[in-house]
Image: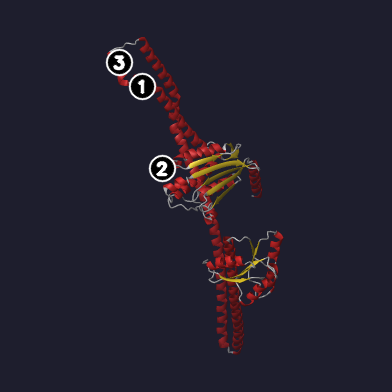
């Protein structure tokens, strides 16, 4: 039963098809509604005269009086004109819908009927109906109260007039008392006026405080973003400074070490060829160090060391690409390079653990041109969205068994493409548990979070929204539903020249005004 509606709300179903009547009757009765039925328009008009329903579901095509004529007669009757009417029809013509709505119907339900749609529309208009009733009742009460106050004021005026007449008739001794009474009334009126002014000032102060609070939230968000980017820059600079120099030293000397080792091995081989018979000490040493294995394995060892050093250099380069500390201004960059660097930084979180398999990342990259943007800030958006997707998948996997996870593995799909309007669209989609509509509606508000204390303060998506919308003139939206995962869509222009010109023009206008 719908708990938001009064119990035993009455619905009249008017339909000439017994099957439709039976199905709707059973369905609505199961949800706690009192259901009346009529097979044609004439019967419906007769029933509403002695048992007015709260809502009417009216078929359009019926023998005799059709739905349009029935609705017209209902709205012409003072007793039934306020009953909401929802048409049920297979007609898809806009003209027919407009005709029905112009006759006073509040909604349309298209056949074949879907129970969820019927229930949703009935609930909506039943709520509106009940709210209208309550409003009418309150208006009646208010009118009665106003009449009582008018009567009281009239009586008070009469009493004042009578009092004034009696005061005039009384002796001069009472005149002074009357003056004191008038003075007291005046003081009370002044006190009431002062109270009203105080209330107005308090309302103004409350509005100012609310505006200041919103501005404070926005400022805090921007300060946190600035501090995060500054800390990230210091971290990357420190890593690059402390690791890059020794790694470059090792990388530069590995080639020499390889050449020296090759020369020494060639020399050893030459000694073995020229002096095949050596002393006992040399033979013992050869056996001790396993010379044949050493000659074979040493070049492989040096090659492995070079591969490891190359990997460290790639990681340092990815950190630099991600932060873009040396690119504070807008310039054309490779979006795919920024996404790859983000995924490399988050690689450890994507790997499998003992309690779950790894999270698969599917790259569906289109053929993108270089995009004008603030690369470091846009990479921060990628970091926030991918990290949130990983958090959502981890939370979802915590509710599933290992066999369920293997049957439906966790996956993040990153898709990029160019639209016809010369804009770039980046989609980041996960197959987690998804979100409700209420959560999605507040997703980009500062300090809104669904994570437990200590796992997030709710500024990542708010900052990402500001970066995409305010800094790049784009859009950041989320499409999600329970058990359907979540998809974040970034839409930004390829070229920012128009945005920059508009910003400069606005700045010049502001300067002239000031």
Q: Residues within 10 Å of mark 3 (few under 14, many from 20)?
A: few
Quick one: 416 or 18, which is closer to the camera? 18
| Residue 496 x/y as whole percent | 63, 41
Quick one: 167 or 100, which is closer to the camera? 100
Quick one: 10 or 286, which is closer to the camera? 10
Pointer 1 with pointer 2, Cβ within 8 A: no
**Tag of residue 353:** 2
| Residue 361 x/y as whole percent | 50, 41
**Tag of residue 62:** none
Residue farthest along the top direction in this orientation: 274
Q: Residues within 10 Å of mark 1 (few under 14, many from 20)?
A: few
Vertical placement of residue 246 versus 471, above or below: above
* Cα distance between the residues tagged 3 and 2: 50 Å
Residue hosting label 3? 283
Let me know if residue 144 appears in the view: yes
**Tag of residue 293:** 1
Residue visible at 42% across and 44% down in the picture: 356
Let me know if residue 327 appears in the view: no
| Residue 15 x/y as whole percent | 64, 68
Residue 424 appears left or right of 283: right
Vertical placement of residue 493 versus 313, above or below: below
Residue visible at 43% across and 41% down in the picture: 352
| Residue 41 x/y as whole percent | 67, 71
First-in-chain label (1 vs 3): 3
First-in-chain label (3 vs 2): 3
Residue visible at 55% across and 64% down in the picture: 203
Which quadrant of the figure has residue 145?
bottom right
Q: How is the image coloured?
A: secondary structure
First-in-chain label (1 vs 2): 1
């Amino acid at each position: 039963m719908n708990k938001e509606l009064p119990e035993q709300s009455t619905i009249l179903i008017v339909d000439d098809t017994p099957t439709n009547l039976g199905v709707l009757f059973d369905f609505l009765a199961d949800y706690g509604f009192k259901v009346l039925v009529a097979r044609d328009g004439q019967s419906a008009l007769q029933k509403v005269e002695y048992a007015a329903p709260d809502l009417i579901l009216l078929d359009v095509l019926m023998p005799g009086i059709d739905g349009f004529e029935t609705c017209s007669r209902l709205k012409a009757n003072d007793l039934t004109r306020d009953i909401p009417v929802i048409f049920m029809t297979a007609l898809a013509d806009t003209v027919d819908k407009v005709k029905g709505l112009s006759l006073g119907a509040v909604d349309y339900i298209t056949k074949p009927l879907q129970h969820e749609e019927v229930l949703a529309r009935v609930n909506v208009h039943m709520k509106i109906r009940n709210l209208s009733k309550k409003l009418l009742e309150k208006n009646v009460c208010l009118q009665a109260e106003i009449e009582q106050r008018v009567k009281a004021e009239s009586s008070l005026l009469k009493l004042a007039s009578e009092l004034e007449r009696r005061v005039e008739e009384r002796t001069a001794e009472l005149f002074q008392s009357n003056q004191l009474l008038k003075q007291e009334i005046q003081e009370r009126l002044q006190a009431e006026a002062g109270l009203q002014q105080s209330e107005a000032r308090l309302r103004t102060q409350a509005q100012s405080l609310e505006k200041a609070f919103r501005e404070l939230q926005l400022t805090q968000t921007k300060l946190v973003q600035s501090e995060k980017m500054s800390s990230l820059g210091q971290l990357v600079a420190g890593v690059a400074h402390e690791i890059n120099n020794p790694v470059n030293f090792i990388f530069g000397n590995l080639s020499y070490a390889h050449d020296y080792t090759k020369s020494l091995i060639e020399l050893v081989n030459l000694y073995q060829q020229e002096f095949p018979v050596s002393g006992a000490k040399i033979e013992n040493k050869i056996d001790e160090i396993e010379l044949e294995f050493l000659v074979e394995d040493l070049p492989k060892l040096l090659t492995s060391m070079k591969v490891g050093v190359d990997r460290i250099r790639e990681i340092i380069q990815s950190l630099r690409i991600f932060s873009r500390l040396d690119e504070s201004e807008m310039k054309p960059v490779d979006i795919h390079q920024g996404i790859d660097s983000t995924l490399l930084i988050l690689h450890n979180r994507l790997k499998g653990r003992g309690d779950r398999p790894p999270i698969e990342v599917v790259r569906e990259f289109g053929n993108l041109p270089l995009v004008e943007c603030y690369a470091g800030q846009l990479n921060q958006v990628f970091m926030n969205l991918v990290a949130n997707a990983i958090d959502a998948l981890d939370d979802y996997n915590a509710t599933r068994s290992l066999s369920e996870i293997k049957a439906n593995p966790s996956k993040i799909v990153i898709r990029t493409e160019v639209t016809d309007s010369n804009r770039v669209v980046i989609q980041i989609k996960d197959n987690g548990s998804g979100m409700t509509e209420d959560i999605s509606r507040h997703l980009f508000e500062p300090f809104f979070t669904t994570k437990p204390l200590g796992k997030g303060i709710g500024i990542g998506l708010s900052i990402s929204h500001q970066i995409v919308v305010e800094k790049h003139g784009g859009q950041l939206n989320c499409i999600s539903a329970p058990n359907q995962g979540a998809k974040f869509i970034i839409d930004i222009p390829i070229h920012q020249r128009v945005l920059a010109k508009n910003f400069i023009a606005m700045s010049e206008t502001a300067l002239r005004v000031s």
